[in-house]
Image: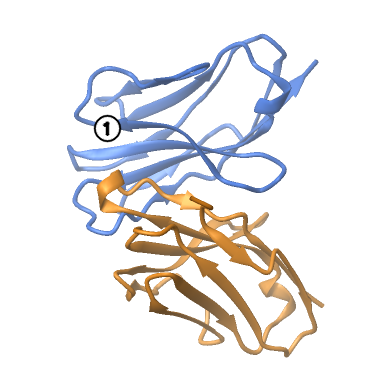
Amino acid sequence: DAGVIQSPRHEVTEMGQEVTLRCKPISGHNSLFWYRQTMMRGLELLIYFNNNVPIDDSGMPEDRFSAKMPNASFSTLKIQPSEPRDSAVYFCASSSRALSYEQYFGPGTRLTVT
Amino acid sequence: AQTVTQSQPEMSVQEAETVTLSCTYDTSESDYYLFWYKQPPSRQMILVIRQEAYKQQNATENRFSVNFQKAAKSFSLKISDSQLGDAAMYFCAYRSEGDSWGKLQFGAGTQVVVTP
């Protein structure tokens, strides 16, 4: 298996622009998690899905952030409009009940908003 | 809500030596899972070791072993025969057995520096 795939790996954008981060979970995994990592706040859980349904989005910082999972093999995290304080590494992770919900992480997307 | 505490921001160890990272957690549950994840400079989060709370035997994975003290709510990671490749940020994480979706609670992390 290719593991969790995230794209792009790096994204540089200007303040006010829309940013879309993409994630492909491991095939067969039914839970998907979006995290944000910064030096100041560490690793934060933003939102997670189970069987494509959002379960808890209480970690989403503002209405500028939105996430979707239209099917079992694809999820997006969108920031509109982006701000410099959104600069961070964004991780996607997936897990499966059959594997005791061990989370497998993607390589992350480093977002820089100037 | 459960909290996970890693009190050591940074630990330094010489090659071939042993280092122990501490992790404590706060929970009222009896069934749960504990994990250690490694994040090297590449940023990739890698699962190092897992411990089920109902198991008394400490988990071991090659040079990595844990000391799980359930009553004390302590879950330390020991890295034996440290190698340069062990240099990374290490995160302790907790998952409730009752969580139906696999949500993890992470600690703040401990940076391990390995010196030749």
Q: Position of residue B40 (x, y in %)?
A: 67, 39
Using a 10 Å C-alpha cutoff, classify the residue at mark 1 as few (fewer than 14 neighbours), some (14 to 19) or many (20 or more).
some
Q: Does residue A10 appear left or right of residue A103 in this picture?
A: right
The blue-tinted chain is: B
Q: Which chain is orange?
A: A
In depth, the one of A25 and A111 nearer the eye is: A25
**Three-letter code for the amino acid on which mark 1 is drawn:** Glu
Report the residue at 34% width, 56% height from top: B103
Judging from the image, mark 1 belongs to the subunit labelled: B
Residue found at the far front of this picture: A1
At x 36%, y 27%, the residue is B74
- Residue B11: x, y in percent? 65, 26
* Count of labels in the image: 1
Which residue does the numbered mark 1 point to in the structure image?
Answer: B52
Q: Quadrant of residue B55?
A: top left
Rendered position, B12 above or below B26: above
- Which image quadrant: the N terminus of chain B? bottom left
Whole-percent x, y for residue A9 in the image: 70, 63
Per the image, label 1 sits on a secondary structure element best described as strand
- Residue B68 x, y percent position in the rendering: 34, 23
How is colour applied across the structure in the image? by chain
Report which quarter residue B69 is drawn in.
top left
| Residue at 62% in and 59% down | A108
Q: Is residue A60 visible?
A: no
Residue drawn 65% across the image and 89% down it = A81
